[in-house]
Amino acid sequence: MAYAKAEKLDQSKIPVIDITPLRDGSDPNGVASKLHAASQGLGFIYIKGHGIPESLIESSRKSALDFFTKSETYKSKIRISDNHRGWLGQGGAKMKDGFRPDLKESFIWGQQESDHKTIDNHPLRGANKWPENLPEMQNLCMQYFQSAHEVAHNLMRAFALGLNLDETFFLRTASRPLSRASYVYYPAQPKDMGESQFGVGPHTDFGVLTVLCQDNVGGLQVQDINGDWLQAPPIAGTLIVNVADLLSRWTDGAYKSTPHRVVNSSGKERLSIVLAFDPNPETKIDAREVFGANYFPKEEATTCGEYLLWRFNKAFSYRKADSSSKAK
């Protein structure tokens, strides 16, 4: 048996874009034009000049690995809550019916106030759960959450400019976001598990935008429009971002949410740091607000909160999905 294979990276399909001129205001429209074009292709983009300090990335990785190497008994003390916060063990996620459960395990957290209180006005957010005797982990997690959120906000401004909208369009209701951050740990994947086992099985991301910080191990693979798989290896100094399902829906498919997967055939452990950016739960996802009142989108309007809850109930084994629930 063998690992699932992928072709080498084609940078005409997954470009590298420097967002410094967006961040410093010297040429936001130039960056917006590049991001707009890439989002209509595979919707995967390497970005450099993102502004997250390398020291914060390295400290966060070290803290995450310290946590994941603890015993299962230790990690189980902060097992995933009904509000999707805490430790999700191996086998706790399956991205698609008919696939084996993912090999990954995750630690997930979200926005919290300066006094450590957490907004709990939606089923997919509530109090963060922090491990015992790792006091630096909470501080690093929240620093990274804020830094990655700033990246996401800059990108959302650029996407709005690329669509000839006011730059605040996608951020009008983002003061109390449903965003989640996660440390994602992948053990080395034995070859004898075969092509049908993945660190994360083929899927599209649920929300608006994903901001991914890879380590130097690799394993991310992206499916092109012909159904072929391409490697998306780490490139020093970059993050990789991708359009997720709600942004694709918001733009009526103009921006592409593309299937991807992880195959860790390196023989080493792999760690990713992920921000899934989503605005407030009441945010209306309606392509008519992008293209005009007389536009007829392929899918009806929904809200960010309704859609995410439906998708989470399907994907995560700890949730009791309502068999009568319908797609939003």
Image: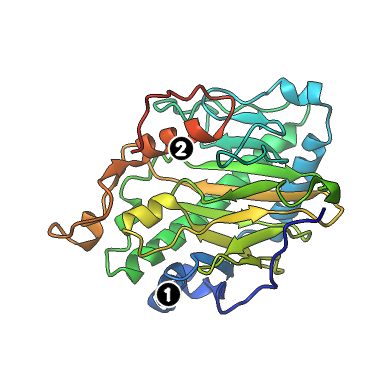
Residue at 69% of width from left, 50% of height from top? 272
- Label 2's element? helix
Rendered position, 233 above or below 312: below
Query: At 73% across and 40% down in the image, what residue appears?
Result: 103
Percent x, y of residue 42: 50, 67
Residue 98: give x, y in percent of width and height. Answer: 59, 39
Q: Can residue 112 be seen in this view?
A: no
Upstream in sequence: badge 1 or badge 2:
1
Instruction: Specify few, some or many for label 1: CA neighbours under 10 Å numbering under 14, 14-19, or 20 or more.
Output: some
Reading the image, the residue beneath label 1 is: 37
Answer whether labels 1 and 2 touch (C-beta < 8 Å).
no
- Residue at (53% x, 25% y) in the render: 319
Amino acid beneath label 1: Ala
Q: Where is residue 176 in the image (x, y as percent from the top left)?
A: 40, 38
What residue occupies the far front of the structure in this picture? 1
Q: In which quarter of the image is residue 47?
A: bottom right
The amino acid pointed to by label 2 is Arg
The picture places residue 247, in percent across and down from the top left corner, at: 39, 54
Is 290 on the left or on the right of 195, as rendered? left
| In this picture, residue 226 sits left or right of residue 253 | right
Which of the labelled discs sits on residue 311, or is there none? 2
CA distance for labels 1 and 2: 28 Å
Residue 324: name its quadrant.
top left
